[in-house]
């Protein structure tokens, strides 16, 4: 029964998402689609953070996935959403594989700064590469979904929402399974104590590289989905503010819960949406206050609310009797 | 009986400080060897060289006839050498049970699964056995930060034995533990290790512990081994009394 648990949860979650999307207004459908797409990118960042690394350059993979989907549509006339998202993930994953050896020896702020530098290099190159649209970027047409092509914008919005929900649920379930696996736990161990991990016979380097590449793949898929939802891509996908948003999301979610990542993403989209509507000239300040409150009152993120609590400490010294 | 571990002519210096001078040590299967010496005498440097944390400048280390000199800790561990630490090296965000599960999982898998639940029935059965052997059952779900020092030592050592090592190095297993807890702690450790063929080398400053639990004692002074014999002989050695124990007859 236990082995069917994740599948049952996945199917139920997907059914719920599809049903809610069918009754929600268009703006909610679009906002949630974007939240899911960005949540997938942030999920990759959470995967990386569980191993003790924070990337300030996740926008690079977000951008790579988006451009891979956009260019495949433009140059190869590819129009199927599944193919485009898979391609976005694959291109970002390969890019991650190529970069990973360069980053393998770095930790903490050095790792974060290097990833940021790489994403800003990509931003600069895309800005000046006119065959890729330069700073204006490129527009994308509406994709099809296997054999289904939406006839109206509303139908397309809902179809993309359902498709994004499907990818989100699949990514969430796979990540949950991974987090509970021995390799997933090893990430937490490496974050806590790299020396001990090595003395136990495991490779911290291999764990870090694996997480980095997987996070890159998720980043690419999220980027491709966001590009399809927006119908437009530009170099800002790789700009540091995009990467900063994913870091914010990961902090807001914490590393304990997969569901919390997507809740955090929806919450952030809502805060941004409403604050830009009601405080059009100072919505960034509203966002900053929100972040401040999260750090003060939920330092381990939304996921910490769902965490299993340890029993309170009782023994103050080694009870000699219990050892005799 | 043939040697399990044979270190020959190990030399290590850190700049102008010579931490090991021509150190040669041998231990047999199942042997309990105490390593004594003042701070800076070279005991921990020796342990670090054997476990791969420090690469010797000269000399060789053979384990069961295989040269493990200069190999990284990860590889040395896979050859059958495990260690515990003076300051227990635990995974702070995990419970003792999770710490030990992690160690068992790494020890039992050539390739760690990315998808299968870490808590497999086989691993959990082995974990329960390990918790019982080290009398850690009641602490299994506690936070590491809330554990008494002696329990942390036990978790540290229990993690080290998960790989069923041929050689186990314990770095000051009773340091930081209250005086009345030292013997019970060592009793638990030794009974947990009993029955196997693991050779145990333990660094210790408490001579009562050494006299009771070691079959042989190596005394270190100024990077050299100045005595190597049964405890009564080494502890009665004039040079050892002068430079190590400080008890001059």
Image (spheres, rainbow, N blue to C red):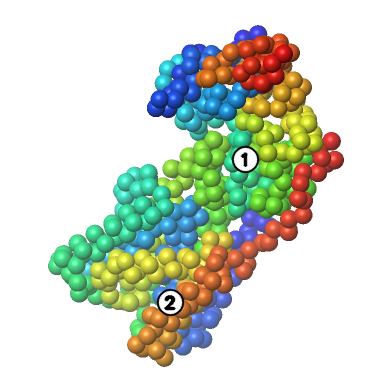
| Residue sitting at x 34%, y 44% | A101
Relative depth, front residue between A161 and A278: A278
Secondary structure at numbered mark 1: loop
Side of B17 where B87 appears, left or right = right
Q: Which quarter of the rendered picture does the C terminus of chain B lie within?
A: top right
Q: Which corner quadrant of the image does residue B188 belong to?
A: top right
* A94 w.r.t. A256: above or below: above
| Residue sitting at x 49%, y 31% | B53
Q: Is residue A61 visible?
A: no
Coordinates of residue A312 in the picture (x, y in percent): 73, 59
- Residue with the mark numbered 1: B88
Side of A208 where A98 appears, left or right = left
Determine crowd level at label 1: few under 14, some 14-19, many 20+ residues with C-alpha closer than 10 A.
some
- Cα separation, mark 1 vs mark 2, equals 40 Å
Q: Which corner quadrant of the image does residue A148 belong to?
A: bottom left
Coordinates of residue B149 in the picture (x, y in percent): 70, 43
Secondary structure at numbered mark 2: helix
- Residue with the mark numbered 2: A288
| Residue sitting at x 42%, y 57% | A54
Determine crowd level at label 2: few under 14, some 14-19, many 20+ residues with C-alpha closer than 10 A.
few
Side of A148 where B60 appears, left or right = right
Relative depth, front residue between B218 and A278: B218
Chain under numbered label 1: B
Coordinates of residue A130 in the picture (x, y in percent): 14, 67
Coordinates of residue B94 in the picture (x, y in percent): 62, 51
| Residue sitting at x 32%, y 54% | A114
Side of A43 where A236 appears, left or right = left
Q: Which corner quadrant of the image does residue B214 belong to?
A: top right
Q: Is residue B13 visible?
A: yes
């Amino acid at each position: 029964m236990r082995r069917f648990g994740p599948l049952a949860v996945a199917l139920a979650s997907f059914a719920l998402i599809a049903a809610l999307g069918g009754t929600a207004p268009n703006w909610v459908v679009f906002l949630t689609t974007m939240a899911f797409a960005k949540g997938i990118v942030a999920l990759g960042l959470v995967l990386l953070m569980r191993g003790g690394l924070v990337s300030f350059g996740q926008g690079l993979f977000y951008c790579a996935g988006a451009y891979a989907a956009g260019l495949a549509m433009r140059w190869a006339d590819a129009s199927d959403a599944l193919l485009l998202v898979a391609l976005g993930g694959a291109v970002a994953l390969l890019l991650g594989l190529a970069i990973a050896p360069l980053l393998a020896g770095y930790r903490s702020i050095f790792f974060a700064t290097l990833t940021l530098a790489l994403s800003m290099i990509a931003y600069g190159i895309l800005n000046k590469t006119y065959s890729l649209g330069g700073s204006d970027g490129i527009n994308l047409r509406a994709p099809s979904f296997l054999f289904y092509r939406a006839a109206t914008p509303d139908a397309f919005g809902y179809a993309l929402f359902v498709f994004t929900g499907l990818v989100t649920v699949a990514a969430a379930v796979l990540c949950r399974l991974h987090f509970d696996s021995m390799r997933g736990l090893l990430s937490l161990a490496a974050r806590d104590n790299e020396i001990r991990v090595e003395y136990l016979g495991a490779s911290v380097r291999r764990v870090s590289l694996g997480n980095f590449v997987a996070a890159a793949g998720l980043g690419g898929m999220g980027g491709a989905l966001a590009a399809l939802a927006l119908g437009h891509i530009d170099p800002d996908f790789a700009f540091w503010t995009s990467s900063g948003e994913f870091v914010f999301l990961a902090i807001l979610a914490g590393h304990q819960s997969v569901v919390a990542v997507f809740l955090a993403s929806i919450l952030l989209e809502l805060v941004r949406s409403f604050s830009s509507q009601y405080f059009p000239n100072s919505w960034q300040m509203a966002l900053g206050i929100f972040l401040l409150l999260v750090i003060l009152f939920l330092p381990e993120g939304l996921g910490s609310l769902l965490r299993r609590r340890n029993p309170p400490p009782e023994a103050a010294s080694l009870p000699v009797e219990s050892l005799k | 009986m043939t040697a399990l571990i044979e270190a020959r002519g190990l030399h290590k210096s850190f700049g102008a400080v010579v931490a090991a001078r021509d150190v040669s040590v041998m231990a047999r299967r199942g042997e309990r060897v105490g390593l004594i010496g003042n701070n800076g005498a070279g005991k921990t440097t020796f342990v670090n060289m054997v476990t791969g944390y420090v690469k010797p400048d000269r000399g060789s280390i053979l384990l069961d006839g295989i040269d493990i000199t200069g190999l990284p800790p990860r590889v040395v561990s896979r050859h059958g050498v495990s260690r515990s630490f003076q300051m227990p090296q635990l995974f702070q965000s995990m419970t003792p049970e999770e710490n030990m599960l992690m160690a068992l999982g790494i020890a039992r898998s050539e390739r760690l699964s990315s998808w299968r639940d870490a808590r497999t029935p086989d691993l959990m059965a082995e974990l329960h056995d390990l918790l019982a052997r080290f009398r850690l059952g009641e602490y299994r779900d506690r936070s590491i930060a809330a554990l008494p020092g002696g329990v942390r030592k036990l978790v540290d050592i229990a993690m080290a034995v998960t790989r069923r090592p041929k050689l186990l190095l314990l770095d000051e297993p009773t340091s930081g533990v209250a005086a009345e807890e030292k013997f019970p702690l060592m009793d638990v450790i030794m009974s947990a290790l009993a029955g196997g063929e693991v050779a145990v080398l333990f660094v210790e400053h408490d001579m009562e512990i050494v006299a009771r639990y070691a079959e042989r004692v190596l005394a270190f002074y100024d990077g050299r081994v100045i005595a190597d014999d049964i405890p009564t002989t080494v502890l009665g050695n004039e040079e050892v009394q002068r430079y190590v124990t400080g008890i001059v007859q």
